[in-house]
Image: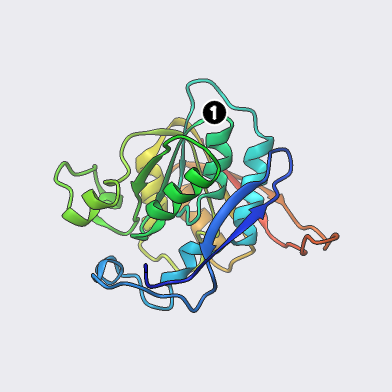
Amino acid sequence: MPGYLTKQENIAIAGVDDLVIRSLLDRQQFSDPLGDAETLGISSAAWPLFGLLWPSGAQLAARMAARPVQAGERILELGCGLALASLVCHRQGADVTASDCHPLAGTFLRENLRLNGMGTMKYRQGQWGSGEALGPPQQDESPLAQAHGGPVHGLFDLIMGSDLLYERDARASLAHFIDLHAGPAAQVWIVDPDRGNRAAFSKQMAAQGFGLREERLDRAALDDAPAYKGRLLVYRRT
């Protein structure tokens, strides 16, 4: 037994076939017998958040489903959690790397790839606020990083994420991390459910040389789809 309970659902995303997703049963789940999450600074309250489906993640997945695959493009998802957007990209044939700091994110990704009959997808450990976010990638990886995919490395043409601005980031760690891994002509797509840290993050991105375009994603409740309020933040190097 893994020490936590899961459920399995069919998730409908406009424009693509449904995905079968295994997720945590609820926010009450917790299992960190070896202390891996604690070592990474993940509290017991934050532990289950990676393994739940979030409305902003579904919004990002729908946007990626509508976006044509571009030959030679490298895509990185930050804070992927259950990696819904990455799974959509992978199914469409894109070169995508999912990343998260949670020690079980890679395990859930592999299981959801299996459930959907998909081949292997690249997964890396992505944790801004670590030494990597503030300087060049290090050659010596910690045993924990090696066990969970190794750190994110290289440059990407599109960096995407959802619900990343949930806490104040006074050190601009996320903006630094993005700048480190964004190619010269990269775009950054972040779906944000109107978090209060959005303005500060955009200023930090501007300091890294990124301009911003915003698009409202507000949607009224329709049939089984709940209402949503948020926006797509699109950053480009200026």
Reply above or below: 176 against 24: above
Q: Position of residue 52 (x, y in %)?
A: 54, 64
Q: What residue appears at the point 77 percent right and 64 percent down from the top-left corner?
A: 227
Q: Residue furthest left?
A: 140
Badge 1 marks a residue whose secondary structure is loop
User: Relative to the observer, which residue lies in front, 39 or 190?
Assistant: 39
Residue 59 as seen in the image, left or right of residue 171: right
26 lies above or below 69 = below
Please say whether residue 211 is visible from this viewpoint: no
Q: Is residue 198 left or right of residue 98?
A: right
Label 1, on which residue? 93
Colour style of the rendered protein structure? rainbow
Q: Is residue 150 shown left or right of residue 44?
A: left
Give the residue type that dot 1 points to: Gly
Taking depth in this image into account, of 135 and 104 the one nearest to the observer is 104
Which quadrant of the rendered structure holds the N terminus? bottom left
Q: Position of residue 29 (x, y in %)?
A: 46, 75
The furthest residue to the top: 71
Q: Position of residue 166 (x, y in %)?
A: 51, 67
Q: Quadrant of residue 137?
A: top left
